[in-house]
Amino acid sequence: MNKIMIIGSGGAGKSTLARQISEKLNIPVHHLDVYLWKPNWVMTTREEQIKIQNELVQNEAWIIDGNYDGTMEIRLQEADTIIFLDVPRQICLYRAFKRMIKYRDGSRPDMQEGNKEKFDFVFYRWIWNFPKKKRPALLQRLNQLAVEKEVLVLHTSKEVDQFLTEL
């Protein structure tokens, strides 16, 4: 486990898990939200996203958390370990809402400065629709990759804790 990719719905716990793995394995974490969102919630161009991620994956060891479907294949190809946090949407929504309350009017640690946490109906709708719209294709792709890469699908906090204990 040197090149670890963590994916899942918003609120699934990707950034938290990335930090926890980093502490145990001493591998640097790269939160894609920090790299891909400019201040005031301006998204980088697709070209910038590709350039940034191509540079990140060239490092000897990394943990990268975030989905970003349009550039996910870059990370999927270079990762030796892929962790999919397949957490129920109700839990993801609860965590995203709790995070919004905790960091309201400020930036969370895994986000670019200048991007204040706020209620975002589009984001919550994306979380709600994730199991139906994103999950099936993601699981299909992960099944294809499981032949050559370590693919872990974790569903509960208990499974995440067990994984961390076994690291």
Image: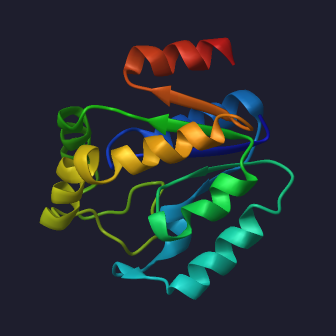
Residue ID at (59%, 87%): 47
Residue 166 placement (x, y as % from top left): 66, 12
The colour scheme is rainbow
Q: Position of residue 91 (x, y in %)?
A: 23, 33
> Residue 53 appears in which quarter of the rendering?
bottom right
Q: Is residue 111 above or below residue 38?
A: above
Q: Nearer the viewer, residue 153 or 142?
A: 142
- Expressed as whole percent of the image width and height from the top left, the position of residue 163 reads 57, 18
Along the line of sight, which residue is nearer the eye, 116 or 158?
158
Q: Is residue 53 visible?
A: yes
Q: Quadrant of residue 48?
A: bottom right
In the rendered picture of this protein, how many numbered marks are placed on residues? 0
Q: Is residue 89 above or below residue 30?
A: above
Residue 100 in view here: no
- Residue 109 in the figure: left or right of residue 91: right
Q: Residue at horizontal 69%, vertical 19%?
A: 167
The image quadrant where one finds the N terminus is: top right
Question: Which residue is located at x 27 percent, y 54 percent?
Answer: 133
Of all residues shown, which one is farthest toward the right?
Answer: 60
Q: Is residue 123 left or right of residue 22?
A: left
Question: In percent of the image, x 63 and y 77: which residue is there?
Answer: 50
Instruction: Give residue 117's quadrant in the image.
Output: bottom left
The picture places residue 70, in percent across and down from the top left corner, at 49, 70
Q: Nearer the viewer, residue 50 or 41?
A: 50
